[in-house]
Image (cartoon, helix red, strand yellow):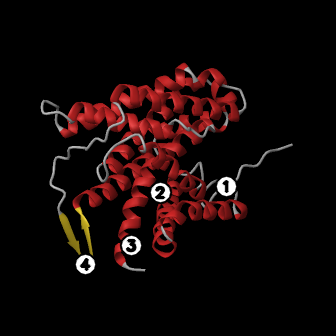
Amino acid sequence: MNLDLLVSALVLGSIYALITVGYVVVFRASGIFNFLHPDLMLIGALTYTTFAGTDNGVGFSVAVVVSVLAVSVLGGLIYVASVDRTSGMPHWIQMILTMGLSIAAVNAAQLVWGGNLRHLTLPYPNTTVDLPGVRTTTTDLIIVVVSVVLCTFLYWLLTRSSFAIGFRAAAENPVLAAYHGIQLRRWYGGAWALASGAAVVAGLAYSSKVPLDPSLVNVGLLAFPAALLGGMDSISGAFIGALVLALVQQVAAVQFGTQSAVPLSYAVALVVLMLRPQGLFGQRVLTRV
């Protein structure tokens, strides 16, 4: 296994981690797997091109901040306006609802922005960087750094900060939390907003390497096994699971061809779930009967 393969896996894994933490944040808060998440990646990246993709557009930093804030608000509003209305219903109903919202969102995005290829404007030259024994690019290094910083921040926010207390109470025992005055809708909506903001960063990271089009949604779904590997309730597990998934896909593509990468990654996730249903770093849930 050469260093170039490991670096490629690291960069791909960093992008997957940016995607997967969004899945985990929503699942930790409400127990829902959010199929709308990949579509928010697409909408966020397209929003960025609206503000920074023209000659009279705003600067890179402003466009990123506006896109993250806009899609974060959108994610929170979607929860309050639709998903919250299914509160108390079985989670499979909520998952089906997010599937329907996903279909509506991707079609709405194509109606507003069209389906043409778009190229992100970057504020720096994407030059080649020579490291000991390997060659990479400026964009790849930035993606890795941003992924580590964002995942570390979310880990601190959801496990170590004062915000984590209310978040954990709302997630683990919503009835008792509501009895003590915790506004569940506010906390769940905040979780959706956080996940949506992370989705924008993930969409921009991937689109900085390849042209942007509606197929970006498929990339969001490809990262799903990473959440299963690491554990659906673990931020650190999401990051490690994303790296493992990317390494499996890169090795499979080299050894058996690109068409084998996705099936093999799902096969690895299936084996892990058979041996450890909660994932590598997920918490085992015990139910008293």
Amino acid type assigned to the residue bearing label 2 in the image: Phe
Crowding at mark 4 (Cα within 10 Å: few <14, some 14-19, many 20+):
few
* Nearest to viewer (mark 4 / mark 1): 4
Crowding at mark 3 (Cα within 10 Å: few <14, some 14-19, many 20+):
some
Secondary structure beneath label 1: loop
* Nearest to viewer (mark 2 / mark 3): 3
> Which one is earlier in the sequence, the residue at label 3 or at label 1?
3
Amino acid type assigned to the residue bearing label 3 in the image: Leu
> Which one is earlier in the sequence, the residue at label 4 or at label 2?
4
Instruction: List the residue tagged with mark 2.
Output: 239
Residue 277 location, x and y as percent?
70, 57
Taking depth in this image into account, of 124 and 289 the one nearest to the observer is 124
The reply to whether discs 2 and 3 touch (Cβ–Cβ < 8 Å) is no
> Which one is earlier in the sequence, the residue at label 2 or at label 1?
2
Amino acid type assigned to the residue bearing label 1 in the image: Gln
The reply to whether discs 3 and 1 touch (Cβ–Cβ < 8 Å) is no
Residue 256 location, x and y as percent?
52, 73
Residue shown at 43%/26% (left/top)? 108
Label 3 – label 1 distance at C-alpha: 29 Å
Instruction: List the residue tagged with mark 3.
Output: 5
Residue 67 location, x and y as percent?
31, 33
Residue shown at 69%/61% (left/top)? 276
Residue 236 location, x and y as percent?
50, 56
Instruction: List the residue tagged with mark 4.
Output: 132
Position of 72 with respect to 91 (left or right) is left
Q: Residue 278 carries which label?
A: 1
Label 3 – label 4 distance at C-alpha: 14 Å
